[in-house]
């Protein structure tokens, strides 16, 4: 089972990034997927989740209206489109399947 994230980087406040996660080693299309993050000096925070079919997204309150989660079950991919980024969104973002988490991708929001 493997999850590999990409798409992080340095962006100015108000900017956008799109994170991607490719999954392998399990039946991706039958499992709920999540994005979680860990800011410097803080614990792990759930950010967003999406059901197996990709029709029911959910978000933590702080990102609702700014982030959009999606998935492509034909490609074993899950995405997180992040708009209107704020400095407090700075964190390592992880793709999470419950039992497995990727290595993470760093997102830094700074001017």
Image: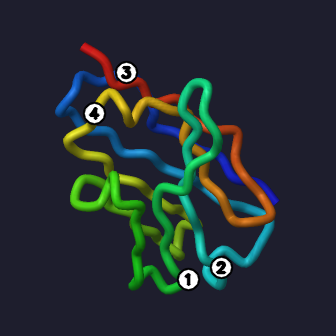
* Neighbour tally class for label 4: few under 14, some 14-19, many 20 plus, Cα within 10 Å: some
Residue under numbered circle 1:
52
Q: Residues within 10 Å of mark 3 (few under 14, many from 20)?
A: some
**Left or right of 73, for residue 29:** right
Residue 15 sits in quarter: top left
Residue 33, given in percent of the width and then of the height, sits at 59, 69
CA distance for labels 4 and 2: 30 Å
Mark drawn on residue 86? 4
Instruction: Classify mark 2: helix, strand or loop.
Output: loop
Q: 10 Å neighbourhood of mark 2: few (<14), some, or many (≥20)?
A: some
Q: Secondary structure at mark 3?
A: strand
C-alpha span from label 4 to label 1 = 29 Å
The residue pinned by badge 2 equals 31
Image quadrant where one finds the N terminus: bottom right
Disc 2 from disc 1: Cα separation? 5 Å
Left or right of 99 on screen, residue 35: left
- Closer to the chain start, of discs 4 and 1, is 1
Label 3, on which residue?
10
Q: Secondary structure at mark 1?
A: loop
Q: Is residue 71 left or right of residue 10?
A: right
SS assignment at label 4: loop
In primary-sequence order, the first of circles 3 and 1 is 3
């Amino acid at each position: 089972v493997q999850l590999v994230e990409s798409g992080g980087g340095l962006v100015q406040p108000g900017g956008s990034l799109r994170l991607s996660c490719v999954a392998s080693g399990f039946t991706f299309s039958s499992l709920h997927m999540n994005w979680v993050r860990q800011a410097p000096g803080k614990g792990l925070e759930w950010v967003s989740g999406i059901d197996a079919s990709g029709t029911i997204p959910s978000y933590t309150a702080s990102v609702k209206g700014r982030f959009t989660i999606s998935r492509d079950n034909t490609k074993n991919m899950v995405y997180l489109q992040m708009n209107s980024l704020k400095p407090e969104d700075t964190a390592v973002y992880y793709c999470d399947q419950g039992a497995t988490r990727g290595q993470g991708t760093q997102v830094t929001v700074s001017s």
